Structures are given as structure tokens and as C-alpha cells.
Amino acid sequence: MKALVNGNATGCANDSTGSGGQEIRARKANRTASSGESQHWSYVTDVYQSYAAKPILANKYGSFAWQSLPANAVTRLDWTLDLVSNFRGVGWNYQISNLPPLPSSVQLALQQSPVSSSSTSKTGNHRYDAPCTLLRASLLSFTLGYLALDVLKVTMMRDPYFWGLTTAPVPAYLPIFIASSSAFTRIYRLLLSLAGIYTALHMIFDLGPLFFVGILGPRVIGARGEPWMYPDTSGSYSNVFSKGLAGWWGGWWHQTFRFAFEAPTEWLCKRLGWEKKSLKGKVLGLWVAFGCSACLHGSGSLTIWGETRPLREPAAFFLLQPLGIMAQIVGAGWLKKMGVRDRMPVWVRGFANFAWTHVWFYYTAPLLTDDLAKGGIWLFEPIPISVLRGFGFGLEGQGWWCWSWPWLTWYSDDKWWRSGLAF
């Protein structure tokens, strides 16, 4: 694997510009040809050559370069920390496919033919080439998210469901058409849960560019301070209208774990001799990805506070998603074979994809949202200062300041392994 770094800042500029650099690139090319290493999926096992450098995009420190596993211990630590924390592979040669490519100037400087000059990917993820544009978008998103979380928190705390009492009736102040209908009650709580999850995640994601680009920048951290290293986390919601349930998970929802969830399929297909893009390869990838997601979210349910059911609820929710995707694909294929699909207007197909996706979630999503509520996830206080509670819209006794609990205490339990520091 190779990371995009600043040449001089990492000590490889001399190798990339002098005759020694030409020899390194030649040796690297020979090893690439013999080992089968590719630009987008590579395994670097030969650490004798510490850098594979190609000059790109000069800045304050000089030129950037592709950097294989460094020999220097300090540089290797920095390289490794970026590897394990950069989930989407931005700036690495295994960047996930949902993201837009590097800027054309960067690709040309890498001596690559630009794959695209577009700053928006096929799923609608946007790349920011100017720091001011990225920071403006991130700051606006963070601010709106903060205000939205305040509204959501105040609203949720008036409904016993979000305290973990998942069978409790809805609050009396809600409209009668919600309170008198179990279907509308479920939809109301599902929408609040979705809004809470989506908003909280994106507020966390917004902190990255605000800190690394807005505060540190390229002068301090080199390539990782460039704005184009922080494309949008989520794609366009139009993916749901065009691809249904598959578009929700593969295009609109955040793709933070995409590379990790696809990696086992890469390995299995290679061992089985299957093409990853073949039908059986795609089916395998679908089940492996959601199986990994079931393990991840089930583990969170297992360790969270409260009476949760990790296997029967969150894990089951994610293991049901491949069935919904496959059912939709089979149904769409049958309609196409019958000649019905091609006669449908585009808006009808889009509405059908939208309807299938949300009907599927209506029946399956409570497995996840009920478990989150019972685990106490909504009791967590996400913001330090509440405008609404400051003006008296919260519960009795609540005010402006929300983080009034002790930051660090000792928690004691009857079992020694359940005792420890509580943060």
C-alpha cells in the first residue's frame, strides 16, 4: 500500500528528483510487474526500498510523493497511524470507489492519465479543492447539526421510548393521527432515530476537516491538510430513487467502513478463483459486507449499557438487508424481462425504489432502533450548551449547561471486571 505524502517533509525528495530517485522508481516498476501490485489494490512486502516516489504538486515543503512502508521508525509510525485511521483510504492507493478522484493537477503530476476531472463522484460525493469552500461547508453543516441535535434531544426526552421503554405509548401532545395509529407511531420514532443517528455522525465527521484543514493545514501536516483529502461523507439521496435499497446503503449512507467490509471478499474471491464483479462474487460481497456490519454493530450492542439483544436485534437487522436488496434486484429483473419496466416512466421507477426501501425499513429498522433505545444511546448528552433548554423548552430543572456530570469517577460493581474508571 502507498500513501500520498509531501516529498521533502518525509525525507524522500532527494530520491524523487535525483538520479537515485530514478533508480528507485525503476526498481519499483520491476517489482510491481513481477509481484502483480496494482495502483488501487496492492500489497507491499518488500521494505528494503523505503520510498516509491514520484514528484507531484509542489507546495511549501516541496513535492508530494507516493510513499511505501518507510524504513525510518518515526516516519513508519506516522505512516501506520494514518493507515489504521484513514478508513476510506483518501490519499492512499486503495481509496474507495464512491469518492471522487484526486484533482487533475495531482493526477498529472503523478504521471497518471486523469481518470476524471469531475469533483463529484458517481454517487454524489463532492471534493473540495479550496480550503475556504471546504471550511465554509463543514462549518455550516456542523452548526446546523448542532441546532438539529438540540431540537432532537429535547423532542426525544419527552417520549418514554427514547428512555428505553420501547412499548410505552407516545406523548399526549402529539397529533391524534400519530397517537392513535401504531403505524404512524412507529414511523414517527423511526424518523426521529434516523435523524439522530445521521446528524450525530455527520457532526463528528465535520470535525475532521475543521481541525486538520482549518487549524493545522498543509504547513503542519502536509498532504493531510489539503482540502481535497476530505470529500463528502455521504452521497446524494438520489441514489435511493435510482437504485433503491442498494442505493441507500451503497451510495447515500456514509461509506466509512466500505474498504474494511470489502476486504474479506477480495481475499475470498482470490482464493476461490472468482471474479469479484461476477454474479456470485457480488452476492458473496453483499453477504460478507453486511455480515461484518452485523458483527460490528452487534458488538456495540453487547458492550452498551442496558438490556440489549445483540444477535436478535441489531445483528439481525443488518443480516436482513441483503435479502431486501436481492429481492428488489430479482423483482426488477422480472419486470424488465416481462417488458413492464421499460414502459414505466422514470419517476414511477424512482418512486417504486423509494417505496420499497422505506417499506423494508418500516419492518426491519425497529430491530436496530429499539435496541439503541434500550441500550440508553439517546440518554447521552451530545452538546454542552442547549439553546432550547436555556429558554425553558426542556424538562424541569434543565438549563443552558448540559454537561454537569463528573468527567472522571470510579464506578464500583459486585464483579471486579465491571468496576473501573468511568469517563
Image (cartoon, grey):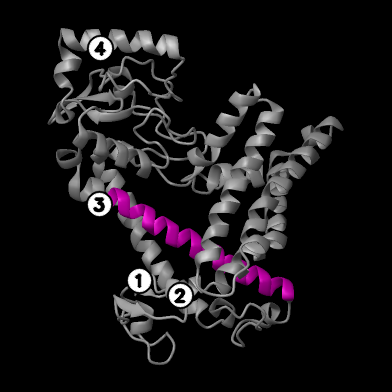
Q: CA distance from mark 4 to mark 1?
A: 51 Å
Q: CA distance from mark 2 to mark 1?
A: 9 Å
Dot 1 surroundings within 10 Å: few (below 14), some, or many (20 or more)?
Answer: some
Q: Which residue is mark 4?
A: 24
- The reply to whether callout 2 and callout 1 are in contact (CB within 8 Å) is yes
* Circle nearer the N terminus (4, 1): 4
Regarding mark 2 in the picture, which secondary structure is present there? helix
Q: Which residue is mark 3?
A: 211
* Circle nearer the N terminus (2, 1): 2
Q: Which residue is mark 1?
A: 383
Residue 262 horizontal/vertical position (percent): 54, 37
Q: CA distance from mark 3 to mark 2?
A: 26 Å
Residue in view at x 42 percent, y 56 percent: 202
Residue 184 on the magenta span? yes
Q: Which stretch is magenta?
A: 182-210
Residue 303 horizontal/vertical position (percent): 50, 65
Q: CA distance from mark 4 to mark 2?
A: 57 Å
